[in-house]
Amino acid sequence: MSTLTGTRHLVRLILRRDRVLLPLWVLVLAVLPMSYATSFFELFPTDAQRAAYAAGTARNPSIVALLGPVYGDSVGALTAQRSGFLLVIIALASLLTVIRHTRTEEEAGRRELLGATVLGRYAGLTAALLVTYAADLLLGLLTAAGLVSTGLPPAGSYAYGLAAALTGIVFATLGGLNAQLTETAGGARGIGIAVLGAAFGLRLVGDTATNDWPSWLSPLGWTARVRAYEGDRWWVLALPLVVSVLIAAAAYPLSVRRDLGAGLLPPRLGPATAGSALSGPFGLAWRLHRGQILWWSVGFGLLGLILGGAAEAAGRSVEGNPQLEQIMARLGGASSLADAYLGATLSLAGLAAAGYGVQAALRMRSEETAGRAEPLLATGTHRSTWLFSHVVFALLGPAVVLVVTGLAIGVTYGVSVHDVPGQLPRMAGAGLAQVPAAWVLAGVAVLLYGLAPRLAPAAWALLAVCVLLGQLGAVLELDQWLLDLSPFTHTPQVLRPTWSATPLWLLTAVALALATFGLAGFRRRDVPVT
C-alpha cells in the first residue's frame, strides 16, 4: 500500500460534502473582479477621468492600506487594485477549507474511522490540498476569463488570475500545516487567521511606507507586485510557489510523526472543574461564541478605522463624474459624497456581519452532528432553551460587530471633518441600521436548521445572492424586483436628512418569525439528524 492510497476516494468525498459551499465561494469571488472592470469602463470612459481617479486613490493612505497600491491609470490597473481586498477573502476561504477537511475531521473522530480502512498515511492531507488547490486554480481561471470578456488584455488578466489563485494556494498549504500543530480545529483556525492578519499588516505597512520592502514579506503583497496590466512581472509568481512547497515539506512529515488526534503544540490544560457560568446552556453558548464575537469585533473595528479615514478622499475622487455620483448616491443614499461612500461601505459591512450571523446559527448544526447536542438535551435542558441560547448570539453578534464598525468609522471620519462628538453616534446608528437585514439571514439559517437541517448550509447561498445583488445591482441597473430579493435593499439610508424606521421594524419582525418557525420545527424533529 502506498502513502497515497485512497486519495481519489477522499477527493470524491470532499467534493460531495462541499458540493454547495465550494462552488459558491469560487463563483462569487470570480465574478466580483469582472464587475469592477465593467464599472470602471462605464464610470471612467476617458483617460483623463481614470488618471484623476488613480491619482486621488494613490494619494490616500487609507485606500492604499485597504486595497493596495495602484500602478497605473488603465482600467486593468484600477481593477487589480480594487480587487485587492478579495485576496484576503480568497486566502481565508482556502485556509478554512483545508482545516475543515483535515483537523476538523480528525477532531470529530471521522479520520480515525477512515484510517481503519485501506488508506495511505498522506491521503487525508493530500486530498484536502488537491481539492482546495483545484478550487483556487478554477477561481483564477474564471477570474481571468471574466476580465478578458470585459475587454481587458489577456496577458494581464491571466497574470492577475494566476496570482490570486496562488495566494489561495499558499494559505491552503498553511492550513495543512496548522492542522498538524494543534489538536483542535479552533486552534488551527486561530493560528491561520493570526498569520493572515500579520500578512495583511505587513502589506499595509509596506504599501503605505516610502520603502515597500515589508510588502515583499507578505503573500498578500505579491499579487500587486506582479503589476498585472502594467508590465506583467511573471517572475513574482515563483514566490508563492516556492513558499507553498516549503510549507508542504514541513506539513507532510508532521502529519505522520504525531499521534492521531494530537498536535505538535501541547494543549493548554483547563481547570479541573467547570465554573458556575457553565452550569446552564447560556453559559455554554457564551463559551462557544465569545471568541468569534471578540475577533470579529477587533477585525471590523480596524477595518472601520481605515474606511472612516478614506471617506473624505473617496468623496472627492468622484466629484465631477455625474454617473458615478448618481450610483454612489443610490448605494449610500446620502446628501454628500462622503456620506454616500460611508453608506455604501456600511452596507458591505452589513453583508459581512450577516455572514457572522449565519455562521453562529449553524454552530447548532455542528454541535448536533458532532454528537454534543444529544447528551445535553438528554438532561433537564429543554430544546427551546438550548436553541435559544445559540440564537441569542446569532442575533447579538452582528449587532455588536456593526456598532463597533460604526464607532470606528465615526472616530477617524470625525477627526477628518473635525467633528468626532457628532460623527460617533451618527455612524454607530448607521451601522446599527444594517442589523435587521443581517438578522433576516440568520433567521433563514435557524429556519433551515429547525425544519431541514441537511439544507442549513444553503443559508450561505442566500448570502451569496445578496452579495451579488449588492455589488452588481446598482451598477448594472437591475430591475427593482430583483434588488428587492435582498433584505439589504430595504434597509433605510439613515445618513439621509430624512428616513423612515418602518423597514427596520418589518425586517426585525421577519427575522423573528423565521427564527420562531425554526424553533417550532426543531421541537418536532428527531435529534440527531445526520
Image (tube, rainbow, N blue to C red):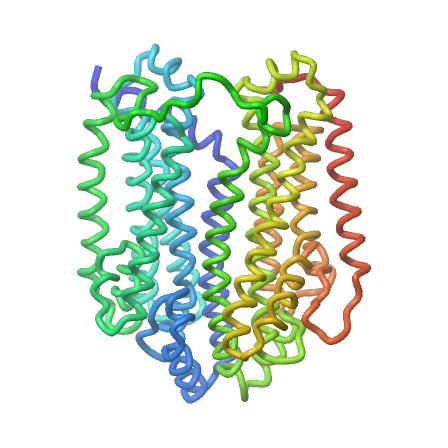
Q: Is residue 136 left or right of residue 490?
A: left
Task: Please tell me which residue is depicted at 56% across the width and 65% down the height of the picture.
Answer: 345
Does residue 427 sit above or below 392 in this rendering?
Answer: below
Q: Is residue 396 left or right of residue 290?
A: right
x and y percentages locating residue 388 in the rendered image: 70, 31
The quarter of the rendered structure image containing the C terminus is top right
Q: Nearer the viewer, residue 340 or 432?
A: 432
Q: Nearer the viewer, residue 404 or 169?
A: 404
x and y percentages locating residue 405 in the rendered image: 55, 58
The quarter of the rendered structure image containing the N terminus is top left
Task: Please tell me which residue is depicted at 42% across the width and 17% down the height of the picture.
Answer: 109
Total residue callouts: 0
**Which quadrant of the structure image shows residue 451?**
top right
Task: Please tell me which residue is depicted at 29% across the width and 40% down the height of the picture.
Answer: 174
**Which quadrant of the structure image shows residue 529?**
top right
x and y percentages locating residue 175 in the rendered image: 33, 38
x and y percentages locating residue 415 in the rendered image: 51, 75
Task: Please tell me which residue is depicted at 37% across the width and 41% down the height of the picture.
Answer: 95
Does residue 453 sit above or below 411 in this rendering?
Answer: above
Does residue 18 sit above or below 416 in this rendering?
Answer: above
**Which quadrant of the structure image shows residue 330?**
bottom right
